Amino acid sequence: MAIPKKNSLEHRLFNTVSFVNGILNIFGAFSSFYLENFLAIFFSTLSPELY
């Protein structure tokens, strides 16, 4: 019976920060609908590698 390998504290912290960053990124994309140029902001936050 194998013992499951636990992730290090740094690994878990990185995953947590990445998850929170992704959630806030999506929230920011959808919260920009009231702005005049919301389409440019919306697509730039969902796909930052295109800009």
Image: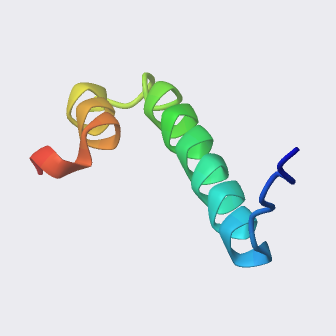
The residue lying at 12 percent from left, 51 percent from top is: 51
Q: Position of residue 43 (x, y in %)?
A: 24, 32
Q: Is 22 placed left or right of 32 in the picture? A: right
Which color scheme does this rendered protein use?
A: rainbow
The foreground one among 31 and 21 is: 21
The foreground one among 49 and 43 is: 49
Say which quadrant the N terminus sits in: top right
Residue located farthest toward the left when viewing the structure as drawn = 50
Answer above or below: position of 23 versus 3.
above
Q: Is 9 placed left or right of 18 in the picture? A: right
The residue lying at 29 percent from left, 38 percent from top is: 41
Answer above or below: position of 34 versus 7.
above
Q: Is 26 placed left or right of 41 in the picture? A: right
The residue lying at 51 percent from left, 39 percent from top is: 28
The residue lying at 59 percent from left, 44 percent from top is: 24
User: Which corner quadrant of the image does residue 38 belong to?
Assistant: top left
Q: Position of residue 49 (x, y in %)?
A: 17, 50
Q: Position of residue 16 (x, y in %)?
A: 71, 56
The foreground one among 43 and 31 is: 43
Residue located farthest toward the front when viewing the structure as drawn = 1
The foreground one among 34 and 24 is: 24
Q: Position of residue 12 (x, y in %)?
A: 74, 63
Answer above or below: position of 47 versus 10.
above
Q: How many marks?
A: 0
